[in-house]
Image (cartoon, coloured by chain):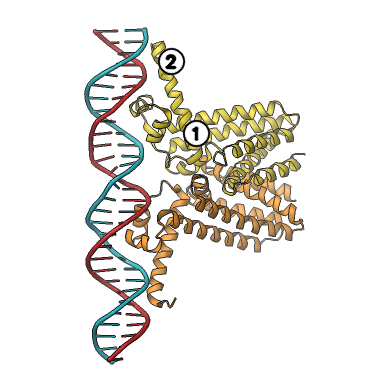
Chain colours: A orange, B yellow, C red, D cyan
Amino acid sequence: MTETATARRSGAASRERFIATTARLLQRQGYAATGLSEIVAASGAPKGSLYFHFPGGKEELAAAAIASAGAQLRDAIATVFASADDVAAAIAGLIDALAAGLAASDYRGGCPIATVALERAGDSPLLRERTAQAFDSWLDAIAARLRAGGLSRARAERRALLVLSAIEGALILARAGRDPGPLQAVREELAELLA
Amino acid sequence: MTETATARRSGAASRERFIATTARLLQRQGYAATGLSEIVAASGAPKGSLYFHFPGGKEELAAAAIASAGAQLRDAIATVFASADDVAAAIAGLIDALAAGLAASDYRGGCPIATVALERAGDSPLLRERTAQAFDSWLDAIAARLRAGGLSRARAERRALLVLSAIEGALILARAGRDPGPLQAVREELAELLA
DNA sequence: AGTATTATATCGACCGGTCTAGATACTAAT
DNA sequence: ATTAGTATCTAGACCGGTCGATATAATACT
């Protein structure tokens, strides 16, 4: 209840470092391939600290990392959308930003949560739920922009599903092929559809 | 070169069993979470046999499983397409078949190779290449159908990328949400676009 | 006899997780 | 204002279990 200030500040800092490190590793290699030792080493902290901040172990840490990465991308989507004139430009801008990030990571980045979603959806209800929530938050952002562009609520939600699905799929294809082509194709096809 | 017949037949049979078992496990839990012990146990074979058939170990076995699953889905796509009157019906039929398979697996199935593609694209050139080849073979099948529907080669290839991307993405969203909604939305939106 | 295949035992390395000890910093009583 | 007390957080050793991989022997077939 009565919480000490400075002790918590330092503690919260290393907690955030754990989350950020984990999010990056999960994005690149998924859940099962990311060991706690690797997380601890990359965070520059001992293993005991990790289990102080995340008593639930790897799963709780991953859940926090997924939530963090989900919120971060949701904000990034909102930022891109805010500086776009029309719906087509908004989607194109989002895809371009994702394509740039993917290439910058030498095709190791991609969606920050898709890998974990696929790996753990069947076995971890917690992670399944967290990934689903992140996807939903992105869908909400896209659908809101589509509604602002004149679509009805139902149509906007349906179309947002197409847009996000196409982007997620294109990120997979681009990563497997080490080629931004799929993202460009999706951008152009969606531009036609949205026009 | 001179290969014995019956010994190889029995050997080839267990080789196929390894591949089929591995393909199923990779689809459901990915590469890193699937142990060789699990594969061996599910195959009903000893571990020594596995390393006789796949001296390259886990990676070679996974590559064979990916190739097998890729060819199998390519054939399934061709089958669905063959019994569809127009392009829109062909795509809708494919999505319906995938949605049915996903629900039948209690949302554990999905794309047989996407998880491995995301997990290992950055670390295993062999698996990256194999997953990319499988995606390409599906793209070819879809593009061929689109060309038969009247599109030019370039437009068909671009649109096939959108179609496959949207399907792959919808499979992720559906799995994370345990809900066929994303697949249905993509089917309906694509039907409009293709009409 | 000779090769192909199976079968099992075992390897070192690393897995996620737990434990205890110690350092740090804020609280509260005097 | 000092200091004893307490909660927070760090630190690293350590656990049983499982990982992918290998070695060697036995079996089946030509």
**B16 w.r.t. B96: above or below:** above
Counting other residues with Cα less than 10 Å from the Cα at mark 2, is it few (<14), some (14-19), or many (20 or more)?
few
Determine whether, in the image, residue C25 is placed left or right of residue A83: left
Question: CA–CA distance between discs 1 and 2?
Answer: 23 Å
Mark seen at residue B9: 2
Where, quadrant-wise, is the C terminus of chain B in this rendering? top right
Depth check: A67 or B56 in front?
A67
Q: Residue at x 69, y 43 (%)?
A: B184
Depth check: C21 or B78 in front?
C21
Q: Chain of mark 1?
A: B
**Helix, strand or loop status at disc 2:** helix
Depth check: A114 or B29 in front?
B29
Mark seen at residue B132: none
Counting other residues with Cα less than 10 Å from the Cα at mark 1, is it few (<14), some (14-19), or many (20 or more)?
some
**Helix, strand or loop status at disc 1:** helix
Where, quadrant-wise, is the N terminus of chain B in this rendering? top left
The kind of residue tagged 1 is Arg
Q: Residue B116: horizontal and vertical position, in percent?
A: 48, 40
Label 1 belongs to which residue?
B24
**D19 w.r.t. B55: above or below:** below
Q: Residue A122: horizontal and vertical position, in percent?
A: 51, 44
Quadrant location of residue B12? top left
Sequence-first disc among 1 and 2: 2
Q: Residue D16: horizontal and vertical position, in percent?
A: 28, 46
Total label count? 2
The kind of residue tagged 2 is Arg
